Image: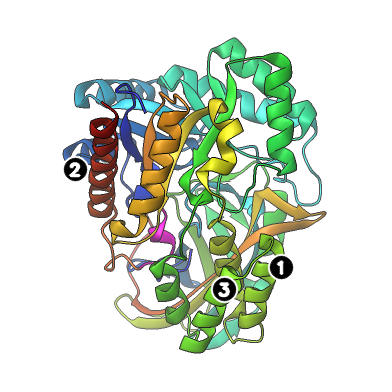
Amino acid sequence: MSDMTQLGTTLFSLTPLWRGGADAVELLEQVAAAGCGPAVELVGHQAWRGFPAVAPEDERAFRDAVERLQLVPVALGVYTDLFRRPGRPMTVEQAFDDIAPQLAAAARLGFPVVRATLGMPPELLGRVAAEAERLGVVLTFEVQGATTPGTPAVLELVELQRRTGTPFLGLTIDSSLSTPALPAALGTALRRLGLAAPGVTAVHEAWLRGGPIGPRIGAALAVVAGHPREAELAPLVAGVLGRCGRTEPEEWGELLPLVRHAHAKFWDVDVEAVRRPHGAWLRALSAAGYEGAVLSEWGGHELLERDEADALAVSAAHVALLSELAGARTAVTA
Amino acid sequence: MATGDTVLTDDSLVHRPEGLGIALTVPWYRSLWLSSVSDIAVAVEGRAIPTEDLRVELGERTFRVGELADQWDVLWFVQDRLLVVVPLAGPPAEGQQVDVEVTVDLRLPYMQIAPQKYVTNHASNRRSLAVRAGAAR
C-alpha cells in the first residue's frame, strides 16, 4: 500500500443511525469527530430519499460537509434491482435506465468510484461500463464472502475489462473473502433466536467443512430445519455463511491489479478478531501496487442489539487497528 | 437483520379511530421498492389478523397487502415508516400497552438465486408497546 492510500469508513456501518433518522451531514460530522475518516463511502439508497434523485440543496450540503470536515468521498454504493417487478426481470434497457442516473448522481456528488453488486448480465454490463467511462466514474463490482476467482460473474467482468482495457471498470475487494472463523456475533444472534448450544456448534461445524459453500450452507440449514423460528434462522445462517469466505489473498493475486476499491469487513465488537486477515489483505494490496482507499465495514448491526454494540465506537476501534496495521507495514518496508 | 428493532421500534404503535396503526421500519439496511414486500402478518394480543383486513399506508398512499407486489416503482425509504392499519372492534386508548407481533417477508430485488426465487428476509418482532397519539413519524 502506498502512502497515498487512505483509510476510512463506509457509512453502511452506521446503519442503525441511518434507520434512526440521522441525515448524511450529521453522520459525516460524527464520522469525522470519531476519527473514522478521512475516506467515506455511502450507499445511495440509504442516504437520500428518492435516490438517484438528490435535491440540489442536499447535494450542496453533502459537498460542503465533506470539504468542511476534510473527508474524502471515495465510493458510492449503487444497485441494479433487476427483479423489482416480481417474476419479470427488467430488460437491459430498463435496467440501464435504472442505474445510469445512479452513476450520474455519484459524479455530481463527487464520488470517483461506484460499487455495484456482482452479477450484471453481460449485455447490460457492457452498456453500464461505457456509461461509467463517459461520466468519468469507475464502475466496480464487489467480490466478497464465498465468491472465488473462478466465479462466472468475476470471469465475465475480467474478460470485459481485458478486452476493452478500460481503467473505468474494476473490482471492489472485500476482506470477507478470507474469514478465519465465523463471527462471535452470529452465535449471539442464533442464541437470541432460540437455537440451543448444540445447534450453534453444528452451524459452525457445517461452515468448517471442506468443499464449496453451497453444500456447507445446506448442512447448516439442515441444523435449523424444523426449529420453531426456522424462517428467521435460515436466511440468517445462509446470509452470514455466504459472506464468510475462505480463500486467501494469494489466490486473488492475478486479479488484484483490477482492484479500485476495498473493504475491510468485520462483524464483532472485538476488532482483534480480524487483525490477522486484515493485515494479510493490506499486505497483498500493497504488494499489488494498490493506491485506492481501504474502508472499514462493520456488519454487526445485522446481528447485535443496539445496546450490545455502538456502531461508531466499533468503527473507530477498527479504523485505529487498520491504521496500526498499515503503519506497521510501512515501517517494515520503508 | 435479526435484531429487536428490525420491524418494530419503541414508538411503533399509533392510535387510529378504526383500530390500531403499527409503524414498521424497512427490515433491511437500504430503501427498497414496495414490490419487495411479499407478505405482512400481524397478531394483536396473540390473535392473528386476517391479511385481507390490513391496510398499508406509505405517505398519502394506501394499499392492501396483496397490492404491494405491483408497487415496483414506489420506494420505501429506509427512514420512512410503513403504517399498517389494523381494524379492531375496540381501538386501544392512547397510553395503553398492546402486545403486537409483526412479520414482514422481504424479497431482495437484486438477488435472484434461481428463476422466481430470491434471497428473502423474514423479519419478525413481538413486543408490548404503548399506543401513541397522532400520526407516525
Give the number of the mark in front: 1 or 2: 1
Query: First in sequence: mark 1 or mark 3?
Result: 1
Disc 1 is attached to a residue of which chain?
Answer: A
On whether disc 3 and disc 2 are found on a single subunit, the reply is yes
Q: Which SS class for mark 3?
A: helix
Question: Could you say which quadrant of the image residue B96 lies in?
Answer: bottom left
Q: Which residue is mark 2?
A: A34
Nearer to us in this view, A192 or A51: A192
Query: First in sequence: mark 1 or mark 2?
Result: 2
Q: For the magenta stretch, what is the residue range?
A: A297-304
In whole angstroms, how far apart are the C-alphas of marks 1 and 2?
42 Å
Residue drawn at x 67%, y 16% is A130
Disc 2 is attached to a residue of which chain?
Answer: A
Q: In the image, residue A157 lies at what x, y percent?
A: 69, 30
On the rendered image, what quadrant is the N terminus of chain A found in?
Answer: top left
Residue drawn at x 47%, y 46% is A175
The local crowd at label 3, few if under 14, some if 14 to 19, many if 20 or more residues have their Cα within 10 Å, is: many
Q: Which residue is mark 1?
A: A215
Residue drawn at x 49%, y 24% is A113
Disc 3 is attached to a residue of which chain?
Answer: A
Amino acid at the residue labelled 1: Pro
Give the number of the mark in front: 1 or 3: 1
